[in-house]
Image (cartoon, rainbow, N blue to C red):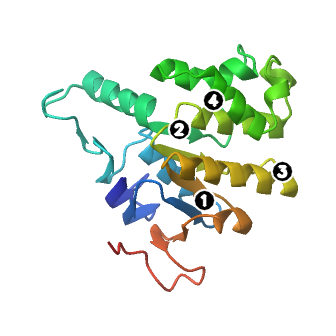
Amino acid sequence: MLKIEKLSKTYDTVSPPILSALDLVVESGQSVSIQGASGCGKSTLLSLIAGFDNPTYGSIAINDYCLRPVKAPAHEIDNNKSASQQSKYVDEFRKNELGIVFQSYNLFDCFNAWDNIAFTARLKGNYNKHYQTELMQQLNILQLAKKPISQLSGGEQQRCAIARALVHKPSLVLADEPTGNLDEATSQAVSDILFDVCRKMNTTLLVVTHSADVALKADNPLWLHAGKLYTDKALTTPWSHSP
């Protein structure tokens, strides 16, 4: 489960906060999409959840991990953590729990497509050649396995990035414009696979997208505006958690 409480982010004291006391709860296996104008804070929200940036205020909890403020289980580490301990804790969270589809792919130029995708599973220690083959077949990229990343198109790299985010079977997937460089037909097919695989694995999925079609595939389509989440495009109904 993903639980965000009173999350705020400001970049200076003059500008209004990009996120303002934002709350969000996503149950395990559920999917949420977030739409909104460019620059409204969608990618910032994903960056905070992933631990790449620090909020000005608020907390983020994913299953047994509490990222901001960082609180490791009592038997692992005390509450007076050094910066290196906090960094190690967040790294463990990313390795074990998180899959990320970056808007800019963030693939390794020194690896071919297969090794790029396998990287997260090998790091976590649950590499499964059969499962990776199956996943790449679903995304129609198995034939690219031995190709250098530099020889792949933007759309092919995007599908590799999606496979890499799923191959280690994370509990949470963050996807930043996962179909942004795909044509309409491929976008529909790839987004179907992303949602379907997460549903089958009981993986929580948070998707940022400008595509209304992709957004509507989510269990809960939301809109981000003025630092708050809304359940309707007209921005009249703020999001609230209903157990």
Residue 131: image tag: 4
N-terminal label among 3 and 2: 2
Residue 134 drawn at (x, y percent): 70, 32
Q: Pointers 3 and 4 in contact (CB under 8 A)?
A: no
Disc 2 crowd, CA 10 A, few/some/many (<14, 14-19, 20+) = many
Residue 146 at x, y = what percent?
A: 80, 16
The residue that mark 1 highlights is: 39
Q: What's under tag 4, amino acid-wise? A: Tyr
Give the CA separation, mark 3 to mark 4.
22 Å
Identify residue type, mark 1: Gly
Tag nearer the camera, 1 or 4? 4
- Answer with the quarter of the image where residue 127 lies: top right
Given residues 30 and 19, the one toward you in this image is 30
Q: Give the number of the mark in front: 4 or 2.
A: 4
Q: Residue 192: x, y in percent?
A: 71, 55
Q: CA distance from mark 2 to mark 1?
A: 23 Å
Q: Earlier in the sequence, mark 1 or mark 4?
A: 1
What residue sits right under mark 3 in the picture? 186
**Residue projecting furthest to the front:** 130
